[in-house]
Amino acid sequence: MRYELSAEGDAKILAVDGYLEECIGDGRPIEALVATRRLGEIASERAKEAARAATKSSWSWTDVGMALGVSKQAAHEKLHARVRGEIDKAQSKLEQAAKSGHAKIARRAARGREELDRVSGLHPKVDSARQRVDEWEERQHDKLSRNVEKGRKKITSTEQSVREKLDRRS
């Protein structure tokens, strides 16, 4: 069995091809290149959505592979790779937020210590205030670290759940 585009779908793709050909012919090759890059991004997202919709419905990975012109294993691996990419992005974003959060806490504590250094000779309780700043900073770093760890666990759990679902469908 071979899957084909509808006449409407084929006409729309030919229209896009006509636009690209026109750009190149009119001396706008960079516009054509930007458009092909954008089309690639869109096509990649739509392929992922279509594969998910197909496998959630009545189609198999064999059907998905045939529609893409690849084996069911290649189609499955392609979707797995995309899931890995999304997981990597989420982990990177979490690590970036953690680094930024820890830096913000450290800056705030440093500002507090600087204020205390300015008034150190004027107030007898500066040492206890400095200790409270240190304790606050430690609590904030600990709290952020716990939340980041929860985020890591959630990402790992989500990844495992998605992989199990994909494996059941293959």
Image (cartoon, rainbow, N blue to C red):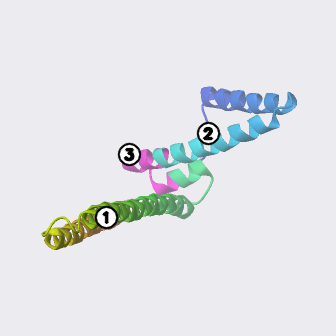
Label 2 secondary element: loop
As rendered, which of 113 and 107 lies closer to the eye? 113
Q: CA distance from mark 1 to mark 2?
A: 70 Å
Residue 35 located left or right of residue 146: right
Gap in Å between the C-alphas at discs 1 and 3?
A: 62 Å
Q: Amino acid at mark 2?
A: Glu
Q: Which quadrant would residue 78 be assigned to in this image?
A: bottom right
Q: Which residue is mark 3?
A: 57
In x, y percent, where is residue 7?
A: 63, 27
Instruction: Give left or right: position of 59 versus 111.
Output: right
Q: Which mark is residue 4?
A: 2
Q: Residues within 10 Å of mark 3 (few under 14, many from 20)?
A: few
In magenta stretch: residue 127: no
- Rounded to the nearest angstrom, the CA distance separating label 2 from label 3 is 19 Å
Q: Position of residue 95 (x, y in %)?
A: 40, 65
Q: Pick whichever of labels 1 and 3 is earlier in the sequence.
A: 3
Which quadrant of the rendered structure holds the C terminus?
bottom left
Do residues under tags 2 and 3 come within 8 Å of each other at their CB atoms? no
Q: Is residue 84 visible?
A: yes
Which amino acid type corresponds to the residue marked 1 in the rendered image? Glu
Asked whether the residues under the numbered discs 1 and 2 touch, taking CB atoms below 8 Å apart as contact, a structural biologist would say: no
Q: Main secondary structure of the magenta part?
A: helix
As drawn, 20 above or below 110: above
Tell me the magenta residue range.
50-63
Number of numbered discs visible in the structure rendering:
3
Residue 38: x and y in percent read 63, 41
Query: Label 2: how many residues lie within 10 Å, few (<14), some (14-19) or many (20+)?
Result: few
Which badge, 2 or 3, comes first in the chain's sequence? 2
Residue that appears at 45% across and 63% down:
88
Pointer 1 residue: 114
Look at the image and tell me whether residue 170 can be seen: no
